[in-house]
Amino acid sequence: MRTLSPPSRRLRLLTVSAMALGLAACGLSGPPPTLYVLGQPQSVATAAPLDGDRPVIEIKPVRVSDYLDTTDLVVRGPDRIIPSQQGRWAERLSVGVQRALAASLGARLPGLILTTQPPIDRPARQVLVDVSGFEAIEGGSVILTARWTIADGASRQSVVSNGAQVTVPLTTAGDAGVVQAMSKAVDELAGHIAPGLSNAR
């Protein structure tokens, strides 16, 4: 025959269980992560306005290596990728690179209209970027490796095809320092791409 536990013992067991669940919930909650975006706050056209005097340049979706194309803000350690516990990207990395690149190119080439969406009419040029590496190295620098193709908007034929590796030192600690260096790396990549668009008509 099963013996029933005294009420006081059952009450103690329930109390301990409730406390354990409460502590677990506190550990899981915590403050929300800080959300970051690449680049400086600049105006970028998301749909190219009608303007017959300025050629339209379409920045196509940027391809980023699968293991990097997340919202995780990561740093590469000696033998592993370390995600930040306090910070995250507000958008997938590929989306952030596309937007920041368009903003930086637009600032460098004020005579052109930069858009990240397909324009109504055929653009003068299309820019296709493939990012094979974009990482912050723990205690070192940010390294961005990319190739790009500038294609004629009408014929879709390649006009320029090139690549570059950009290195930016990490001068500030923490997530903010990583974001700052990665934003600068995208801006420097735009500096490599911009000359190929200067004669767009």
Image: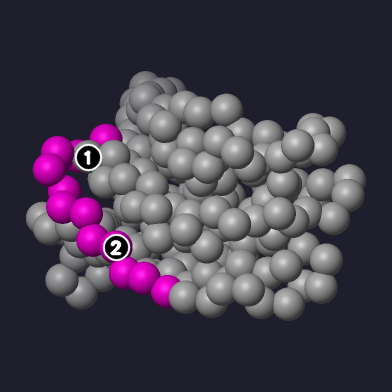
> Where in the figure is residue 53, as x and y percent of width and height?
75, 37
Residue at the spot 47% in from the left edge and 58% down from the top edge:
195
State whether residue 165 is above or below residue 90: below
Look at the image and tell me whether residue 172 can be seen.
Answer: yes
Q: In whole angstroms, how far apart are the C-alphas of marks 2 and 1?
A: 17 Å
Which circle marks residue 177 in the picture?
1
Amino acid type at circle 1 is Gly
Residue at the spot 42% in from the left edge and 74% down from the top edge:
163
Region rendered in magenta:
163-176
Give the quadrant of the C terminus.
bottom right
> Where in the figure is residue 72, as x and y percent of width and height?
43, 51
Q: Is residue 27 left or right of residue 37?
A: left
Label 2: which secondary element: strand
Q: Is residue 18 left or right of residue 150?
A: left
Amino acid type at circle 2 is Val
Q: Earlier in the sequence, mark 2 or mark 1?
A: 2
For the residue carrying disc 1, how many other residues have a C-alpha within 10 Å: few (<14), some (14-19), or many (20+)? some
In reply to whether residue 155 is colored magenta, the answer given is: no
